[in-house]
Amino acid sequence: MSTPIKAKAALISVFSKEGLEPLIKKFNDLGITLYSTGGTEKFIKDLGVPVVPVEDVTSYPSILGGRVKTLHPKVFGGILNRQDNDSDVAEMKEYNIPQLDIVIVDLYPFEKTVASGASEQDIVEKIDIGGISLIRAAAKNFKDTLCVSSVDDYEEVLELISTNEGTTTLADRKRFAAKAFNVSSHYDTAIFNYFNEEEVVYKASYTKGKSLRYGENPHQKGTFFGDFDAMFDKLHGKELSYNNLLDVDAAVNLMAEFQNEDPTFAILKHNNACGLAQRDTLHQAYVDALAGDPVSAFGGILISNKEIDKATAEEIHKLFCEVVIAPSYSEEALEILKGKKNRVLLIQKPISLPTDQVRSCLNGVLVQDKDAKTDSLEDLSTVTNNKPTSDELSDLIFASKLCKHTKSNTIVFAKGKQLCASGTGQTSRVDALRQAIDKAVSFGFDLKGAVMASDAFFPFPDCVELADKAGITAVIQPGGSIKDQLSIDYCNEHNLAMVMTGTRHFKH
């Protein structure tokens, strides 16, 4: 039937009763007969609203501890029958099956149960069988049945039913069917991902997307799928853009390397750090991070691993920046930073990040484990006669952490736990090194005594030669080239220290 349908009966079977009361009362006012089971049935009765137990329709009790309640031909016949099919209508009458015009279901909270750390037995019990079947049946038969599959839709349904006195159009029912299949497919994806341990299968589902002003460029459409509010409290500023979100992601992943360390401040631009410093105070860390590249810092993303205080906020306020991220802000700092109406201020919450990375590729996607390896002192193998000093070792690890989060090919210079310069995203490692030297010189850094980090091995000794002539005294790199010895020999001849990690950190 393509004509509007005035509802006469509704089946309600929900886990959460939140927001349900106004709907039930409206249905009752409109004379819609209600059918229900278990806790939902009791909830309706307690509201003083008449309700028909499903058992009265099926002549069969709820069994197996509530696992089987609605799975019965009289229930599914009432949902799946086609009102424009004479045979269906005749069978409905023959078997005394009630027509169900509306089905409202809220599934067992499978994902929340998994996230809670519950036992496997408890998780399995939260796999909804009857509810998911009701959703699929009602959505399939959208020509005759309105399927309401989420508590998030109750207000919309209430307005629809109230405005039209219980009547729905085919367009209404088809729209809610799409919502229902979104719910059911997401639910099944979550269950599969929980159980899957062997199949090389990629399944992901995000039920809520946030439309962005545009994508990477104004002529591109952009949408963010994820739970931003679970990661951040947004305190101030404009809506984040597609490019902002990419930079925020890069900033968060970089600062994760320094979470439990001394005050550290980073400034990022186009997914790369243009400033990074670690100091005794956050104020000094910010000042020295900004010194790394005050030109690129304009319009950048700022992130701290400590609470931003008044002194640091006063310095930040002098700079035009898009986003500031910190675990917290002092009241004075917040007041200062809110002085720019569009500046986005975020508090990062302590939640776990995904362990895999996904990107579109050709006619599919590439999926890989996140680069969770952070080089440590224990990983280092000194391959030169000259060994790095303790200060150089500290700077080498500092530079390596930054190098890991910088676009390949990359070279990073650091001195005194401060980024002096980096060469990023170059087609050759020599070009990256030359770019880093030019930047360091242009911003007044003395590279004598600085260290160098490379995200991949040196195929020739030209890089260590250029670094040596620029003043670099220690180098960290993964090694692995068939010509490693050429670079080692050069370092030995010119008193450079070189350590190898055995781990490459490409970032494309």
Image (cartoon, helix red, strand yellow):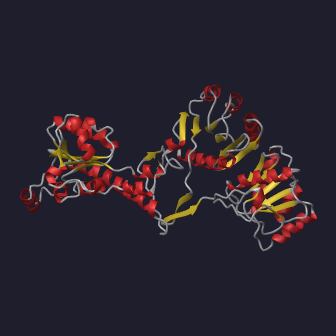
State which quadrant residue 489 falls in: bottom right
Q: Residue 145: x percent and y percent?
A: 20, 51
The residue at 33%/43% (across/down) is 16
Residue drawn at x 49%, y 69% is 198
Residue 181 percent across, percent down from the top left: 32, 55
Q: Is residue 237 visible?
A: no
Relative placement, left or right, of 346 versus 7 is right
Q: Nearer the viewer, residue 319 or 387?
A: 387
Most foreground residue, 364 or 127: 127
Residue at the location (76% across, 50% down)? 398
Q: Nearer the viewer, residue 232 or 2?
A: 232
Q: Determine if residue 467 is in view.
A: yes
Q: Nearer the viewer, residue 425 or 114?
A: 114
Among the 4 quarters of the image, the one containing residue 268: top right
Q: In the image, is 408 to the left or to the right of 64?
A: right
Q: How many marks?
A: 0
Q: Residue furthest bottom?
A: 482
Rendered location of residue 74, percent (x, y): 16, 57
Quadrant of the drawing holding the C terminus: bottom right
Vertical side of 68 occupied by 15: above or below: above
Q: Answer with left or right where residue 300 lies relative to residue 465.
A: left
Residue 258, image x, y percentages: 69, 46
